[in-house]
Every structure is written in structure tokens, then in C-alpha cells.
Image (cartoon, coloured by chain):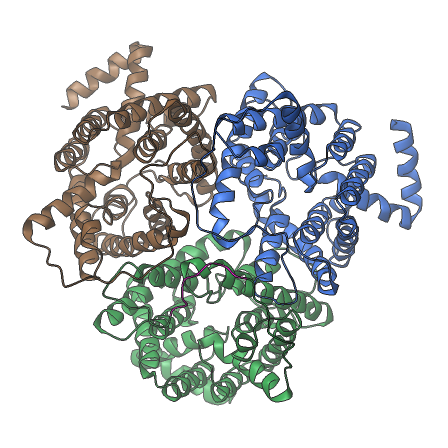
Chain colours: A brown, B blue, C green
Amino acid sequence: MKSSLATWESLCAASGALRFIDVNLRSVGQVMFQDNPLSGVLFLAAIAWGSFAAGVPQVLFAGLIAVVAATLTAQWLRVDRASLHAGLYGFNGVLVGLALATFLAPGPLLWAYVVLGAAVSVVAMEATASVAKAWSMPALTFPFVLVTWLLLLATYGFAGLAGTALPAAGVVVPFTSMAATRLDAGAFVQATLLSISQVFLKGSVIAALFFLAGLAVNSLAAAIAAVAGAIVAVTTAHALGAESDLVTGGLLGFSPVLTAVALGTVFHRPGLRVAAYAALGTIFTVVAQAAFNVALTPIAIPALTGPFVLVTWMFLLPRLALDKATADPSGS
Amino acid sequence: MKSSLATWESLCAASGALRFIDVNLRSVGQVMFQDNPLSGVLFLAAIAWGSFAAGVPQVLFAGLIAVVAATLTAQWLRVDRASLHAGLYGFNGVLVGLALATFLAPGPLLWAYVVLGAAVSVVAMEATASVAKAWSMPALTFPFVLVTWLLLLATYGFAGLAGTALPAAGVVVPFTSMAATRLDAGAFVQATLLSISQVFLKGSVIAALFFLAGLAVNSLAAAIAAVAGAIVAVTTAHALGAESDLVTGGLLGFSPVLTAVALGTVFHRPGLRVAAYAALGTIFTVVAQAAFNVALTPIAIPALTGPFVLVTWMFLLPRLALDKATADPSGS
Amino acid sequence: MKSSLATWESLCAASGALRFIDVNLRSVGQVMFQDNPLSGVLFLAAIAWGSFAAGVPQVLFAGLIAVVAATLTAQWLRVDRASLHAGLYGFNGVLVGLALATFLAPGPLLWAYVVLGAAVSVVAMEATASVAKAWSMPALTFPFVLVTWLLLLATYGFAGLAGTALPAAGVVVPFTSMAATRLDAGAFVQATLLSISQVFLKGSVIAALFFLAGLAVNSLAAAIAAVAGAIVAVTTAHALGAESDLVTGGLLGFSPVLTAVALGTVFHRPGLRVAAYAALGTIFTVVAQAAFNVALTPIAIPALTGPFVLVTWMFLLPRLALDKATADPSGS
């Protein structure tokens, strides 16, 4: 595999068109921290499967349009070349496109909105990186969260954009389970896998396997951390008495999965102390996800990966001597 | 005009009383980034016209009391002399005074509230500048927004202050236009001009012309950017299907106007790439304004210029090679 | 007293167990900025009295468990030894424990929640300190506020944790007093003392006296500032027409008390200009407390000491020449 990647890299160096494709594939891979075009291909396959299986092909197309729009905007703004080639200016755009097409009804204005959001996500990335750099922090998916929250909130004021799949606005009501629900083995496995696929807003077991493959081709540790993080998240959420549908749908697990991958493999060298620290962060991300869901109830928007960003920043900011840092934390 | 300003400046240098008036006039001018006492005079004329025409003279008086209270507080706190003389410690106070008297019922506690808010706006300015300086960012109107939000929110807990003109609290409901409303030429011109006058919380065409004059005497580019920004904002808001009354009242346009002036003329040298970048920021400020309106619905306070601050910071933080910076970004 | 403290210190230097107790007592003392084990003992006595008198002994136990959990976590994370010994890694944990047991129903998951919250408060402290350090700002109780808000919000999504004493969710409604309520001498004294005891979430006059004693043994100025701040807060809240029960219950005064102690004695050398500046901050903290109460109404969580943190940061960030700083501002 390494030699095919080397061949691909030399082809990209020779061809502007292939380089452009390469940058966009790496951008898709960077949604889960993987700077590898093959990860991007497998992630795209998962998105395609998930979109077509759910009867929403426009989600795939929005993701593709958005990543291209983001890359073109980054080129126009003459951003740092190395970061651009590593896909760091595109992954927020991918997510903006997927989210907008997931929560909003199709229509001509949706596509204008996708392009606008993708373009602004590049500015937001540069702004976030500029602030975060002061503490050697990565931008994570904060630009995606910020830009998408604003775009989704605004749809309530625009007749031209209908938020057909947005959560309903309401007052905060405590959740009380009808009875002690059991989480049997099948439900547990589904909950674990969907926690992984929901990172890309997809609720599909097959998509989850593609996502895991995309992680594994670049980093086996990342794939293991994703599964472990999902298991920790599902167990925690169930133990605390979360709504069964949220747990089995992976909707309390996708932020914790990202936290587990980030804290456990990307920004620290894996090890026992790191694993314990990452587990604490992963458990607290479940709490943060539930908290964001509640806090956003009155304004009727989804939490997206906001809880992951908050908790991962909180756990990365202390310069603890857990290990020696392996990855460049100024990256994605 | 330049020679009269030079004469005025030499008079101010000789008289403490004239210097005090000069500082307060420049503070009014700095609401739209103009360090010029004549801009201040014309802006004040606009505020006076708008206040008396709408039957709310107390708004003018609150603005005057607030700017004086802010200047006195700044002198007591011994802030930087050059920034004080440039009006940078007073423009947030002006806006606090105008906003409080616009949204709250008159009464003895209102005036105490205006003085308190103006005094605290100086502390908030110094605090914001201290943080923003780390990225060479201007404070913009963040101190005004923060202090006024807190003061307005608190009135719901105080029987002594009645928020008679505050928005009603409610749950978020998607806006659906009854039918395709048309924006004819008259409505378009009104929407454009009121987008400018609403920067000072005024809905008056004549006030808007005074504001434009106040911009033009100091910077023709700023006046052009204000009009262009307003046109972009009105067009965007209408195209996305915003409520007609909000559009024609200028209520979705005042934040974008400020973004256009800031990004297009104050912090960048005007040019083609800068204009395109400022237009992107202006369009996104319309989205942010609608988003803030929605997000603040449950807590029943107005967005003020919060969307302008957020988007302008987001677009200024990337140190892009769009041009060479002309203005000192550590200013207003 | 000084010699007994010196004896105690030498005993701690010799015994790991005593040092551990010392660190935890200082952590309790640091809730109100006092790096003194005797302050911790008196504060604990106050918490014990308040908890048993109100029939909620679990609050005391939660505070004890939390401070120990926080200290152990800090040791595991190998934080800075001097700051650990000064109690700077435990005071947020104490407050997390007290708050969780105050607002949530007892039960096995509550204790897991207390330990989780206390452990994460240490990470949050290190993260906050890392950011705040850039402006030589103290972390204050921000870690407590952030972690507790998330934990409390999340309970609305977890059937295993019941927020029996959380505020009810609702829409924002302006408060109108039925008639002009008078605040007689007895009510005024009660309001003042409870404003002090509510710093530790206790509504008890006797507890307040213990808290004042705990301040006085380490800093007479701090005890005076606490009383003066409480008087200013009660007077301001009543003058603005706040709800009588909130005023006499000390619920609008505990954040201002902390602001008064912090601005008046901890981070500035006491003096006339400092007192005036601290008074302005204290008055504005009353506004901020009322504002937070309103803003949090739709999501049904308490403001905690969030208003104190916001206003004190705002008033500390300007590097004003009010005095020469006495305390190390990088502390609690």
C-alpha cells in the first residue's frame, strides 16, 4: 500500500488536476484526522453508501460540492500551501455540506447555502487556527460547528430554506425512562457502530465498517480508539439512563468517538496513562453531548460535534507529561 | 475643510473644555470608525433628527449623557491619552445610551442605568482591547454588545426598569412568507437607507442621509462601502426570503453595513480582492444577523451589532495577503 | 495563631497524610481566596452546619468526597506542586461537589457524578489557567461553573439523575413587584449575611458567621470586603426592584461578594480608588447575576458564580494604575 501511495504522490506532483483530487480526498480523510487520500476514498464510499441507502443522495453531492468549494476558496485566499495539501482547509467544508443537506430540504437555495457555508468555513478555519495557535491547539471541527450553527439558525428567519429535519423547538423537560431498558448484544453492537458512522452524520452499520477501514489503512491505533471510544460512550450513556433511541442511533457517541481518537492517538502517543486520560475525556464528552442537546432545545439546532471540540480542547490545553507528543498539534 | 479642522485642533490644544467636546464628538464619529469631530456633529444631528421625529427625545439625551459619562470614566481610569483623544473610549458608551433609552421606558432608574452602563463600557473596552491585542484585533463594538445585553437581560428581573420596547420572548418558529413579496424600487431604497441609520438604532431616511454625510466628510470610501454593503445586505436578505418588514426596516442590514465599512475600507486598503472578500463577509453577516435574532428569541433581547462583531473578527483574524493594511487595527 | 500555623506546617512537611489533609483544607479555603488551612476548617464547619441544619447532610459529604477526588486527580496528573499545595486544584472540586448534591437527588449515580465532576474540574482548572495565563489572569471559579453547568444540563437527558432542586424551565417573563416592598433592618441583615453564605450554596446566618470568621483569621480586609460587598449588592438589588425573596435569600449577592473580595483585596492593594473601582464591579455583578438568571431560564440551570467570573475578569483585564498589585494574579 505504501508504494501505491508513493506512486500516487508522484503522479500528483506532476499533475495539477490529480493534486486537486488528492487535496479533496485528504480533506475528507481529515474529518477523522487522517492525512491519507485512501482514507478519503473509503470515507467517501461510506458517505455514498449511507446517503443512497437512506434515500438522500443530495447529501453526498452536497459534501462533494462543499469540499471542492472550500478548496477553491482556500486557493483564492492563498493559504499556507502545506496545510492546504494536507487537507486541513477542506474537512470543515465537507461537514458543512453534509450537515446542511441532512437538515435542510433540497432546493436551489440549498446549493447556494452549501457553497456559501463551504467558502466561509475556510475563513473560519483560518481565524480559529490563528487564535488556537497561541496555545498550540488544533482548530478541530470548531469552524464547521460555528458556521453550520449560524446557517441552520438563520433558516428559521428565511422562507427560502426549510429546516425539515431540524429538531423541534421546545422547553427543557427531564427525560424519564418508562422502564429499565436493556441493551442486548445486537443493540450494543449497533450502537457502537452507529456512534462511528454518525461522525459523518450517517446512521448505517455498513458505512461504519467503511469508516473503520478508512481509519485502519492509515492508522490501526485510530481504528481501535474509535471502537473503544464508541464502546465507552455507549456504556456510559446507557448506565446514566439516556434515551435508548439516542444510544442505539449513535447520537450520543459520535462526539466521544472523535474525542477518543484525538486524545488517544492523534495528539498523544498511545499508552496506559494516555488511555486512562482519553477514557476520562470520552466519558465526559457523553455528558457534554447530553448537555448540549438540552441547552440547544429552545433554539432547535443540533449539537453537531460541538461537545467534542469543547472537551478535547479542555483536555489538550493542560500541557501534561502524559507522554511525548507525537503529532503536530497545530494540524487539524 | 481641512484648514477648519486644523484651526479647531489648535483651539482644542489650547482649551480643556474644547478638547473635552472634541473627544466626545470623535467618540460619536468612532461608532462608524471616523476619527473626526465633524463626522461626530453630523452623526449627532442624525440622532437628534431621528429621536425627535420618532417622539423619543430621551434617546438623544441618553446618548449625550452616556458619551460624557464614558469620557469622564476613562479620564478617571487614566487610560491611554492618544486613544482617549481619538474617541476610542466613548463610542461604546454612546451606543449603550442610545440602546437603553430605545428599549426601556423613561424613568429615574433609566438614567442611573445609562450612567452605570456607560461607565462599565469603558472597563469593558479596556478589557476587550487587552484580549484582542494579542491578535492585533480591534475591539469593535463588542463592549457595547456585552454590557447592553447584560443590562437589558437584567431588566426582566427588576421591577424598577421596564423593557417596553424589547422583543417578546417566545419559542423558535420557522418563518414562512404568505406569498412571494416583491421589493419594489421605493422599498429597496428605503431598506438600503434604513440599514445605514439602524447602525445608530434609528429608522429614518433623513437621518441616514446625515449619517452618510458624516461618513463622506471623513472618508468617501466609507460612505460608498456603507451604501454598497446595505445594497448587498438587502438583496441577500430578500433573496433568502426574510420577513419584508425586517428588510425594509433596515433591521437585517445594519450589522452588514458595519462589516462592509470595516472589511472594505477601515482595516484593508480598498481594491478588487478586498471588495470580494468584504462582500463575502457582508453576505455572511446577513446570515449571522438572522441567526442571532433566532437564537435570542427565547431570552427576548435584540441582537444589536453582535453579528457584525463576530463576523468581522472572523474575517479579520486570518492574516491574508489581500492587500497591505492601511489602518491601525488596534484602534476602534 | 501564626506560631500554631508554623507548627502545623512543619508537621505537614514531615507527614504525607497531614500534607494531604492540609492541601484539602487549603482547597476549601481557596473557594474564597484564602490559602490557609484554618480558613478551610472554619469554612468546613460552616458547610457542615448549613448542611445538617437544612437536613441535607449529603451536601457536606459530597463536598468532602469531591475535594479528595480532585486532589487525587491532580496528583495523578502531576500538576505543579506549589499550586497544588496552595489548594488551587481543589477549590473548584469542592464547589462541584456541593452544587451537585444541592441540586440533584441522592442516589448511587450522584456519587459517581460527583467523582467524575471533581476529576474533570482539575483538567478544566489546568486548561483555564493555561488560557488565562496569557493575560496574567486567575482562573477564578470558571472551571467549577463550566463543569457543573454541563453536568446539570445533562441530567435532563439522563433518567438516572434527577435534578429535583433545579430551577424550572420557562419562558422569560418580566418581574413586576406587587407593591413597594420595604426591606426592614432584620431583612437587610439577613440578606447581607446570606449573600455571604450562598458563596458556598448555603442559606444560613450561622454558617455566614463561620465563613466570616474563616476569612478574618487569614485576612481581615477580605472579611470587611465581603460584608461591604454584600451590603452594596443588597442595596443595589433592592433599589432596582429585584424580587424580595431573591434579595433576602442572598441569591443576588453571592457573586457580588466574591467580586468585592477579589477586586478589593486579593488582586489590588486596598485603597480609595480601588474601593471605588471594586464598588463599580460589585454593582455591575448584581446586574450580571440578574441577567444570567434570566438568560438561563429557558434551559433551567442556576447561574452559579458565572457572573462573578465574567465581571471580575472584565475588571481585572485592564491593567489600570489603581495601585500596585499585591497578590500573584496567576493564583486562584
- Which is nearer the eye, C255 or A261? C255
> Of all residues shown, which one is farthest toward the front?
B178
Q: Which residues are magenta?
A: C166-173
The image quadrant that residue C241 belongs to is bottom right
Q: Quadrant of the C terminus of chain B?
A: top right
- Which is nearer the eye, B93 or B300? B300
Image: B84 above or below A46:
below
> Of all residues shown, which one is farthest toward the top?
A15
Residue B304 vs residue C208: left or right? right
Place of residue B49 in the rendered image (x, y in percent of width and height, measured from the top left)? 80, 40
Q: Determine if the magenta segment contains residue B98.
A: no
**Secondary structure mostly seen in the magenta stretch:** loop
Q: Is residue A7 visible?
A: yes
Q: Quadrant of the N terminus of chain B?
A: top right
Place of residue B231 in the rendered image (x, y in percent of width and height, measured from the top left)? 61, 24
- Which is nearer the eye, A205 or A309? A205
Place of residue B74 in the rendered image (x, y in percent of width and height, measured from the top left)? 74, 54
Q: Residue at x 18, y 30 (%)?
A: A46
> Of all residues shown, which one is farthest toward the left?
A185
Image: C325 above or below A142:
below
Residue C259 vs residue C120: left or right? right
Q: Is residue B265 visible?
A: no
Q: Residue at x 85, y 49 (%)?
A: B20
- Which is nearer the eye, C206 or B300? B300
Residue B4 vs residue C215: left or right? right
The image quadrant that residue A201 belongs to is top left
Q: Determine if the magenta segment contains residue C172.
A: yes
The image quadrant that residue C112 belongs to is bottom left
